[in-house]
Amino acid sequence: MKNKIFSGLILLLAINFPQLFAADNPANTGLSFLKFGAGSRAVGMGEAYVAAANDASASYWNPAGLVNLSGTELLFTHNRWFQDITNEFAAVGFRARKNAFGVSFMSNTIGGIERRVIASAEPLDILTAHDIMFGLSYARGLGENLSLGTTVKYLYQKIYIESASGVAIDFGLQYQTPAQGLKTGLVFQNFGFISKLLEESTKLPQTIRLGLAYQLPFQILNGEFLIATDWMKILDSTSHLNFGMEYNFVKYFAVRFGYQTGYEDKGIQGGFGVGFNRYRLDYAFVPFSSDLGNSHRISVGIGF
């Protein structure tokens, strides 16, 4: 039964594959903060994380990955972007037999927006825009190899005195293939709606991600090596290929590298992680071109 479910979803994606490349305009969607990613580990791996997700950030990347939790995990991430943009993410995930649950929160703040009603040298005011996402996730393992999960999100945005709200849903799966160490994942993200902001309609960045992750079945210098790749498509917008790798040395220190295709202002990124007992600190660095600056992302994870 589980193989039929997995095969059916892959077939559905394959049938619609040509249509998914029909458009290439990133301006067609709003709420860009939903595309920023969550957690430093995933970002350091080039956001190739759909099949590899196994921590609390799975509530963002692929809720089916919450089944991989061994206990309860708290995750906090601070992301300092360019142009006075800050992004915060917090999540908790826990396992209960074959079931897993998660709660997540993401906020995005853009400062320094100048308000004018006529052309003038000085603005009337300096505004701040806020975006918020609150999510509830559920996942369940079906046998030893297949897990399914979903995240329901409440969305809210506010600019000056205008605001809008909405609801979106993610649905994902992870499947351990018969090949040792090879896992695949599929997720549909941000399918829902949001109300108009003043008189402007906003289209959610509906996204499909399909990925592979391969954990080498042998150690290299006493360390584990993970390779991952994702294909992701924002409907009515762009598609990208993401590549990532992680070398985890005796589970205390990890080095990560990633590369993303199809972006004008970014490509290479990387990071590292250190862990001790139930605590983990992760860092990701994403350089941007066109004088935009760089992104520094720091995550703290606590296991129970």
Image (spheres, helix red, strand yellow):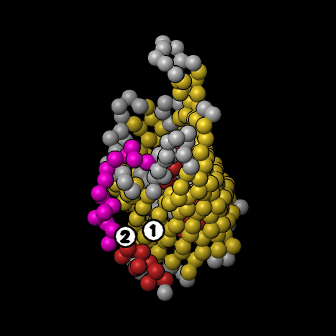
Amino acid at the residue labelled 2: Leu
Q: Nearer the viewer, residue 32 or 65?
A: 32
Q: Which mark is residue 185?
A: 1
Indicate the secondary structure of the residue bearing disc 1: strand
Residue 83 in percent (x, y) is at 49, 30
* SS under mark 2: helix
Question: Which region of the structure is painted magenta?
Answer: 15-29
Residue 270 is covered by the magenta coloring: no
Q: Residue, x 36% and y 76% (percent of image)?
A: 11
- Is 24 one of the magenta-colored residues? yes
Residue found farthest to the bottom: 1
Q: Who's the residue at 36% across and 51% down the image?
A: 237
Considering every residue shown, the one lying at the far front of the view is: 199
Task: Kindly indicate whether the residue at mark 1 contacts the one at mark 2 (C-beta within 8 angstroms).
Answer: no
- Please tell me which residue is depicted at 39% across the width and 56% down the height of the picture: 235
User: Does residue 276 appear in the picture of this structure?
Assistant: no
Among the two numbered marks 2 and 1 on one chain, the one whose residue lies closer to the N terminus: 2
Q: Nearer the viewer, residue 164 or 230?
A: 164
- The residue that disc 2 covers is 13
Percent position of residue 31, x then y: 51, 46
Q: Does 251 sit above or below residue 76?
A: below
